[in-house]
Image (cartoon, rainbow, N blue to C red):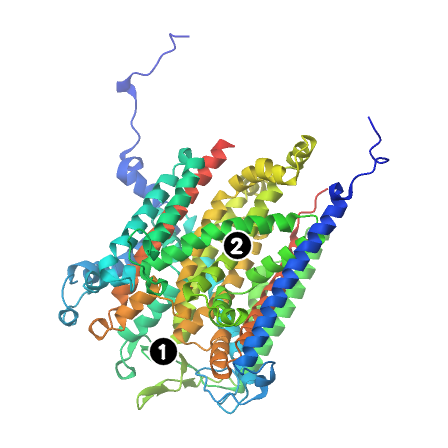
């Protein structure tokens, strides 16, 4: 066997130079047919028409740290609007000298999120640290204890409010969604009908109608003299909305469970609660992690709708800056800045979801 | 082992009785909650002197609406104002859906192209437009109209027959002529004829195996019938070109900045999602299907028509429909930039009459009808398209 002739290195014939390296790559990926060549030329033309002017506008001709007056003479982008107003855009009306508190809360949130990325860290202590973290964050924002000065929640705004609405919204909506999904799968007709009506009704209407409901009808529901703050009302609407979507995702996971799992649990003598808690939900919820992350992404984007009921979220604080005569007219720069924040948030989440999907499918 | 049936089970351990008990408790709780909320609401309404009922629909609205497909003035009723809003919603959604499907399909196919550059450009488009909230996109496009575009006097003129200014986008269109109505009728008739021919051709092919050049015949009928009608009606060629009168254009066809920004935002946002749907659908058909069809000697067009599309569409249509519904639901964001869609008109109505409950209920009912209709159509399609197994 060993004496089968092996070609020595010198005898190896290299492929022609136009099939390897940069030229080969270009030939096989950009110009492998006449149609593809046309497409490549058109794409390059399009890029040449758009990218250099954009770079010129955004970087070469732009100004970065001047007053609004000086900006009007610049030919490029006026990024000065960001350094001059970033604290208002991010923290809203939070008292200026107390803004370290929301900053600390946000850092805590990001550290927790970063730590939760790794699946090895998913255990009970992580869950407890999330609960503790959320409580501390709430305390940092609200104040009033341990010598922290109390800050009224009407002063919360900006990116802070956007994160608050999405994080607390999802944390509260998740258990509610699981309960609704279980209710929809239930054998009791009354419970099942109630859940179906709720889920289908919420999913059928646009979020904005729920927000209108929260801002103008909800006060009518309460007995005289009782008022609930506007942020909380919007939060309730977002929770109700997100829960219905989570319920549908979880239902998909429940339906994917094999019947044998239920039967095995029953034959072990487990009751309904234990069957769900110990057997079904741990498996079903694992299957639906990737679609749950997409719900998280859309919940994060949907919080921007609270602008319409005049809550000061990230988008609204930006618009407030734009209504200041000094910065009027620089909406392109300001909106691009906000778009980048949203994009980074959503893109990292969707990337993470893709990675997780791969890991989970490998695990099975 | 005892015979359990003969043994008396205490009633609190009997699953059937327990289920009835649970449901009774749940219904009681929901009922009590509803009663509590309704009684509070009635009390509050009485105290604040707010009228109830839909009587306001017959009163004069006394507000103007910028864009309307039907005749409307401030003297018209609230009911008519709401109809104007609903028609505007349908109008922007309908045009949006058509453009979205075309654009989304192109981008989805481009994403799968073997051309590296094109595929990357499509991927960037999809990521960017999916990950920015649609409301922000609307604000961005709307602000572009006011900060970048010139006044009508200095309107941009990028293409012949197209004018861009901060009052909107104006096209040169053929002058109104009765021939256009006839052409529309001819086109609809063409659609019916093509549908019948396709059915007949499919039946014949299944029975005899004979092929019929459906695509070419359909194209000739769909284009030819309206053209022939146009020629028979005297071939009117007069154009209505926009002319600057005072501070704005007259003539031509103008779309307002609100309409264009709404359309642009909705279309770009939804097209990114549609592109992903299309890509997933095409990828769901395994390569072996194409190879098998080619091995049978089918031509590329037939491979696409008879083998790939029927399978890919089964995967594409359901999520595509839900994206279309999303577009319709997202069109409610028009209220933020002032396009008079249904929610915007309903919002004005609520502010004027104070009847918030009725107003929000009307919004919810309208959108529930949309989504119910969609799911009825979807169920019908799913039943029709479901795999028939042996």
Q: At which x and y percent is residue B262? A: 42, 70
Disc 2 versus disc 1: distance between alpha carbons? 40 Å
Please say if A120 is above or below A303. above
* In the foreground, B266 or A143: A143
Residue drawn at x 43%, y 53% is A168
Q: Which numbered circle lies on residue A243? A: 2
Please say if B42 is above or below A50. below
Secondary structure under badge 1?
strand
Q: At which x and y percent is residue A242? A: 50, 56
- Drawn side of residue A125 relative to residue A328, left or right: right
Badge nearest the viewer, 2 or 1: 2
- Drawn side of residue B362 relative to residue A234, left or right: right
Secondary structure under badge 2?
helix
Local packing at callout 2 (Cα closer than 10 Å; few below 14, some 14-19, many 20+) is many
Local packing at callout 1 (Cα closer than 10 Å; few below 14, some 14-19, many 20+) is many
Q: Quadrant of the C terminus of chain B?
A: top right
* In the foreground, A37 or A254: A254
* In the foreground, B377 or A315: A315
Q: Can residue B233 be seen here?
A: no
Whether labels 2 and 1 share one chain: no
| Subunit that carries the residue with mark 1 | B
- In this figure, which residue is indicated by the disc labeled 1? B168
Residue B263 in which image quadrant: bottom left
Specify the farthest residue to the right: B6
Please say if A331 is above or below A99. below
Residue drawn at x 51%, y 92% is B75
Q: At which x and y percent is residue B253? A: 42, 81
| Subunit that carries the residue with mark 2 | A
Q: Which numbered circle lies on residue A206? A: none
Please say if B119 is above or below B90. above
Q: Quadrant of the N terminus of chain B?
A: top right
């Amino acid at each position: 066997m060993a004496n089968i002739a092996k070609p020595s290195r010198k005898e190896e014939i290299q492929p022609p130079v136009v099939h390897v390296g940069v030229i080969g790559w270009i030939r096989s990926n950009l110009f492998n047919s006449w149609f593809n060549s046309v497409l490549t030329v058109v794409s390059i033309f399009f890029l040449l028409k758009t990218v250099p002017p954009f770079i010129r506008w955004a970087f070469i001709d732009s100004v970065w740290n001047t007053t609004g007056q000086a900006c009007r003479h610049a030919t490029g982008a006026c990024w000065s609007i960001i350094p001059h107003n970033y604290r208002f855009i991010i923290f809203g009306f939070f008292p200026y000298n107390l803004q370290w508190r929301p900053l600390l809360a946000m850092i805590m949130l990001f550290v927790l999120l970063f730590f939760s990325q790794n699946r090895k860290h998913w255990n009970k202590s992580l869950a407890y640290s999330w609960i503790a973290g959320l409580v501390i964050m709430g305390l940092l924002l609200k104040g009033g204890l341990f010598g922290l000065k109390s800050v009224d929640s009407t002063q919360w705004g900006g990116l802070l409010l956007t994160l608050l609405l999405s994080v607390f919204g999802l944390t509260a909506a998740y258990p509610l969604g699981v309960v609704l999904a279980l209710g929809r799968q239930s054998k009791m007709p009354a419970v099942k009908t109630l859940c179906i009506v709720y889920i289908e009704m919420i999913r059928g209407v646009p979020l904005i109608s729920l927000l209108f409901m929260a801002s103008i009808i909800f006060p009518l529901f309460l007995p005289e003299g009782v008022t609930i703050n506007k942020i909380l009302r919007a939060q309730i609407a977002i929770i109700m909305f997100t829960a219905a979507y989570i319920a549908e995702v979880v239902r998909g996971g429940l339906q994917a469970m094999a019947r044998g799992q239920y039967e095995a649990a029953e034959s072990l003598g487990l009751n309904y609660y234990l069957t769900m808690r110990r057997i079904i939900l741990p498996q079903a919820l694992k299957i639906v992690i990737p679609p749950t992350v997409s719900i998280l992404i859309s919940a994060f984007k949907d919080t921007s709708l609270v602008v319409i009921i005049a809550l000061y979220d990230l988008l609204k604080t930006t618009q407030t800056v734009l209504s200041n005569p000094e910065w009027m007219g620089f909406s392109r720069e300001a909106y691009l800045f906000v778009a980048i924040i949203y994009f980074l948030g959503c893109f990292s989440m969707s990337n993470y979801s893709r990675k997780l999907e791969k890991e989970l499918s490998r695990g099975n | 082992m005892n015979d359990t049936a003969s043994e008396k089970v205490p009633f609190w351990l009997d699953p059937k009785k327990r289920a009835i008990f649970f449901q009774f408790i749940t219904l009681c709780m929901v009922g009590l909650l509803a009663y509590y909320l309704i009684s509070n609401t009635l009390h509050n309404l009485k105290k604040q002197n707010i009228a109830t009922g839909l009587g306001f629909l017959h009163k004069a609205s006394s507000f103007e609406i910028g864009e309307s497909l039907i005749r409307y003035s401030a003297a018209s009723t609230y009911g008519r104002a709401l109809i104007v809003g609903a028609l505007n919603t349908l109008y922007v959604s309908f045009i949006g859906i058509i453009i979205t499907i075309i654009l989304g399909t192109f981008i989805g196919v481009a994403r799968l192209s073997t051309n590296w550059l094109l595929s990357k450009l499509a991927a960037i488009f999809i990521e960017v437009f999916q990950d920015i909230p649609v409301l922000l996109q609307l604000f961005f496009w709307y602000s572009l109209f006011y900060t970048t575009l010139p006044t009508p006097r200095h309107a941009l003129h990028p293409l012949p027959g197209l004018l861009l200014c901060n009052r909107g986008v104006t096209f040169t269109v053929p002058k109104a002529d009765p021939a256009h109505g006839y052409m529309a009728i001819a086109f609809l008739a063409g659609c019916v004829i093509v549908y019948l021919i396709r059915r007949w051709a499919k039946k014949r092919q299944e029975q005899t195996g004979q092929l019929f050049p459906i695509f070419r015949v359909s194209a000739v009928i769909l284009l030819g019938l309206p053209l022939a009608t146009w020629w028979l009606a005297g071939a009117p060629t007069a154009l209505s070109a926009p002319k600057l009168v005072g501070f704005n254009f007259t003539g031509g066809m103008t779309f307002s900045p609100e309409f264009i920004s709404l359309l642009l935002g909705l279309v770009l946002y939804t097209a990114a999602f549609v592109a992903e749907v299309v890509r997933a659908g095409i990828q769901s058909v395994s390569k072996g299907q194409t190879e098998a069809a080619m091995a049978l000697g089918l031509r590329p067009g037939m491979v696409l028509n008879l083998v790939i599309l029927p399978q890919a569409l089964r995967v594409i249509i359901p999520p595509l429909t839900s994206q279309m519904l999303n577009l319709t639901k997202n069109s409610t964001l028009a209220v933020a930039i002032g396009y008079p869609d249904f929610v915007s008109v309903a919002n004005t109505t609520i502010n004027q009459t104070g009847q918030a409950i009725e107003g929000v209920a009307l919004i919810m009912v309208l959108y529930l009808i949309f989504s119910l209709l969609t799911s009825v159509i979807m169920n019908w399609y799913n039943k029709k398209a479901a795999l028939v197994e042996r």
